[in-house]
Each structure stands twice: as C-alpha cells, then as structure tokens.
C-alpha cells in the first residue's frame, strides 16, 4: 500500500494496495490502464447491484435506465476532473502528488475543508460497515429460507430472525479486524472480488432465465403504482439514492491512480481506465437491473437474491448468498482498514510513550503461529465492530440504508470536493464559462442528492416506526 508523502500531510490512509513494489529509492509504480480498470470494477460492483432491479421498478422502464445512464455520465465527468488533480500544479508534470482524496483537498482547499472531507469520508466508510452487516444477515437468512422452501413448499412459514446473524457476522469481523493492515490482506481482497462477480453473474443469469420462462417482459413505463402521489415521490427518491450508492468511486480514485506507471501521464491512463470501467459497470448494472425488473415487474424484490423472486434451483440460491457473505467479509475490511490505520497513527502521535498504544505482545496458541497483539488495536477495533453491529441491529433495512448512504455522500464526496479541487488547481477564472458550467453541474447534483436524502430518511423512519 502506498504510504503518505509530501502532498497528503498524513490526512488519510490510502485505500488501495500499490500495484508496484518498494525499491531502495521509494516506490516503483507498475500499474497499467487495465489494472486500474480492474481495481475500479472490483471496488464498484458490490452489494449495491442487487438493489437495482427494485430501483428500476420504482422508476419504470424509461426513467429507470435513464437514471442509470445519467449517473454513469456524472461519474465519468467527475472521474475525469479528479484524475487531473493527482499531480499539482500541472496535471501531467507537476512535482507534487496528491496520493489520497483528503490529501488533494488539503493541498488545494486548506485544512478546514480537509477535516470536513475526512469526517464525511470516514462516516461513509463506517456506513459501508453497517450496510455490509445488514446484507450479510439477510443472505444468511436467505440460505435457510431457500432450504426451508425447497423442503416444505413455497407457502411454508419459513421465518428467521436477523439479529443473531448480524452478531455472527460481527464476531467474524472481530477476528478479521486483527489483520494489521492492507499488506497482510491481499488474499482476502482477491477472494472478495471473485465472490462479487460470482453472485452478480448468478443474479443476472437468473433474471434472464426467468424472463425467458415467463415469455413476457413485465413492468410499466411509470413503475410500481402507489396509493398516493406523495408515496410515489418517496419511492422515487429512495430509488435514486440506491443508484447513487452503486456508482461513484471518488473515495479511491487517487489511490488507484497512485499505482500507475508513467509515461504515459497518470491522468491520461486513469481517464481511459475510468471510461472502460464505467462502460463495463453500466452495462452490467443495466443487465442486472433490467432483467430483474423484466422478470418480476412491480414485485421486484429489494435484494435480487434474498427477496425470493427466485426459489429454484435452491442450491444455486444458496451458493450465491454464500458468495455474498464471503464478499462482504472482505469488503467490510477493505472499508474499515483506513479507519483502523487513522486511529493507529492518531494515538501513536498523541501518546508516543504509551505502552498501551505502542507495545506489541506475542501471544502463542498451540498448533498456531505466534500472534502479535497490540492492546490499542484490540480495544479500538472491538469497539468499532461492536458499534457497526449495534447500528445494523437497530436499523436492519437494506434498501433504505443504501439510499441514505448514497444520498448523503454523493454530492459532497463525489461532486463538490472534486469540482472545487479541480477549479483551484486548474485556476479556472470565477464567472468564466467553464466555472459557470462546473458550478451549475455541482448545484444540480446537490438538488438531486437532497431529494434522495429526504426520501431515504422518510423511508428509514417509516420502516422503523412501522
């Protein structure tokens, strides 16, 4: 993993392991357009893909696919702008590298903006931990339900509580959280990536097969009918939030770009990699979302593999949900390690003489290799995992939580900071045509994000009170 250098002021730990190797003089970057595209696709395609059939069902056959294409376009523009911010002041030959998201914000917008950025960034990472805990619990119950329905029929009262499985997932994450850092978890990331593609392809295949079996394409132009216009507005806003959750990858763009070799210039390579990954992701999302909606119409489940639109083959449903759980085990760690590393650095700098903070103890367990334990890591990471598990138990609502996270983070992290950093770094004159276009783009995205945020909060409150 690339460690901070002059440009990032230690603002945040990089999220992506370096695609190169360390040499005596520093880091040898060996990443290419294809490795960068692979990083993006692996990071972006996750549990959010399973909610897209439900999102299209709320929006209908016209607005649903159109919304996905719009968000794809917004992501493409944002990634193009941000790719030019890796080096400063010149995007191709600048001597300073902004190797992390918060580092770019700190250099261009100042420390106050950097702290706000870090707060939002790590809130988003914490939210991913909550979402992954909820999703793992749903998938665990889905395996038991699939077996129950297969044995006793589709009308059998197969019901299982969710809190127990959240606690089991939390216990597993507690053990995995003692992995020191990204250097030691490459194997976990590889397994998670393979599992992600496995369950996404299964969902796509089942949706296509069901559509063919039905002999008709279900759904309508306007989407799921609701009893009142207000309810329809709330559902549309939640669907937009779900789609917003599925796309942006600004949190990790600069970390990926920091793995690229040059020449050619890193920003040119990253732009091409972004276009490839966005095209692949959008095609994949449209296929999963549209085939799911075509198969189930207004009855499209909130989670394509756990909502039991599919009952058979039950063993394939079991396998897909097992893949989801394995992916989430690794994904939780990918999004939690930056917070762990930030805490390690913060306490080490504040308490350099503390044995509790800095001492490492060797624990020997029979038949296992020696285990190096730091008491601060044990306490902080235990509290962190416990807190994400507790929030997930309190708010176990998959679609509403996805929509809330997507709406909450879309504008500030995917739009506002990248646009402002680009304007400062490229010295875009105030009130010039380019400045007006960029600010208009930012304001429009703010309004969309606010609309999705209000709807997602309403959905979350309604689910909790209901």
Image (cartoon, rainbow, N blue to C red):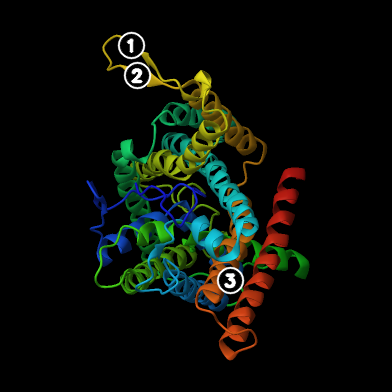
x 31%, y 51%: residue? 18
Residue 364 falls left or right of residue 76: left
Q: Earlier in the sequence, mark 2 or mark 3?
A: 2
What numbered label is drawn on residue 420?
3
Q: Nearer the viewer, mark 3 or mark 1?
A: 3
Mark 1 or mark 2: name the one nearer the start of the chain.
Answer: 1
| Numbered tag placed on residue 169 in the rendering | none
Rendered-image quadrant of the C terminus: top right
Q: Which residue is mark 2?
A: 371
Determine whether 305 is above or below 216 in the image.
above
Q: Nearer the viewer, residue 347 or 338?
A: 347
Instruction: Measure how far apart labels 2 and 3 are at the Cα level.
Output: 46 Å
Would you identify the image quadrant in which residue 428 lies? Answer: bottom right
Please report contact status of discs 1 and 2: CB closer than 8 Å, yes or no. Answer: yes
How far is disc 1 from disc 2 in space, using C-alphas?
Answer: 8 Å
Looking at this view, is 184 or 218 the one in front?
A: 184
User: Circle 1 sits in a helix, a strand or a loop, which is it?
Assistant: loop
**Of label 3 and label 1, which has the lower sequence position?**
1
């Amino acid at each position: 993993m690339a460690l901070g250098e002059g440009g990032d002021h230690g603002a945040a730990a990089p999220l992506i392991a370096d695609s190169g190797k360390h040499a005596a003089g520093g880091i040898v970057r060996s990443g290419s357009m294809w490795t960068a595209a692979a990083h993006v696709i692996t990071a972006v395609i996750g549990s959010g893909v399973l909610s897209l059939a439900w999102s299209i069902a709320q929006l209908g056959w016209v607005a649903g696919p159109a919304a996905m294409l719009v968000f794809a376009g917004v992501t493409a523009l944002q990634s193009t702008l941000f790719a030019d911010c890796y080096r400063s002041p010149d995007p191709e030959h600048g001597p300073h590298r902004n190797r992390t998201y918060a580092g770019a914000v700190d250099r261009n917008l100042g420390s106050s903006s950097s702290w706000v950025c870090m707060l939002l960034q790590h809130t988003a990472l914490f939210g991913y931990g909550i979402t992954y805990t909820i999703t793992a619990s749903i998938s665990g119950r889905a395996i038991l339900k699939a077996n129950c329905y297969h044995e006793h029929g589709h009308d059998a009262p197969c019901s299982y509580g969710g809190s127990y499985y959240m606690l089991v997932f939390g216990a597993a994450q507690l053990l995995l959280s003692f992995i020191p850092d990204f250097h030691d978890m490459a194997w976990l990331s590889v397994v998670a990536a393979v599992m992600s593609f496995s369950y996404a392809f299964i969902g796509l295949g089942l949706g296509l097969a069901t559509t063919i079996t039905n002999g008709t394409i279900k759904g309508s132009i306007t989407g799921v009918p609701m009893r009142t216009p207000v309810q329809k507005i709330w559902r549309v806003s939640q669907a937009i939030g779900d789609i917003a959750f599925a796309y942006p990858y600004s949190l990790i763009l600069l970390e990926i770009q920091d793995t690229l070799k040059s020449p050619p210039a890193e920003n040119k390579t990253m732009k091409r990699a972004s276009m490839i990954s966005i095209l692949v992701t959008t095609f994949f999302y449209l296929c999963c979302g549209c085939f799911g909606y075509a198969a189930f119409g207004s009855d499209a489940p909130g989670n394509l593999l756990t909502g039991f639109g599919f009952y058979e083959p039950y063993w394939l449903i079991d396998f897909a949900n097992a893949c989801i759980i394995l992916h989430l085990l690794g994904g939780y760690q990918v999004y939690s390690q930056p917070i762990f590393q930030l805490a390690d650095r913060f306490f080490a700098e504040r308490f350099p003489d503390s044995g509790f903070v800095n001492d490492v103890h060797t624990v020997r367990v029979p038949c296992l290799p020696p285990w190096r334990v730091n008491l601060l890591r044990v306490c902080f990471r235990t509290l962190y995992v416990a807190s994400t598990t507790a929030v997930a138990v309190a708010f176990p609502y998959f679609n509403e939580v996805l929509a809330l996270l997507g709406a909450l983070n879309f504008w500030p992290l995917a739009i506002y900071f990248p646009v402002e950093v680009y304007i400062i770094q490229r010295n875009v004159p105030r009130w010039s045509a380019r400045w007006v276009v960029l600010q208009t783009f930012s304001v429009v995205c703010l309004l969309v994000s606010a609309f999705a945020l209000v709807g997602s909060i309403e959905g979350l409150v309604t689910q909790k009170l209901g």
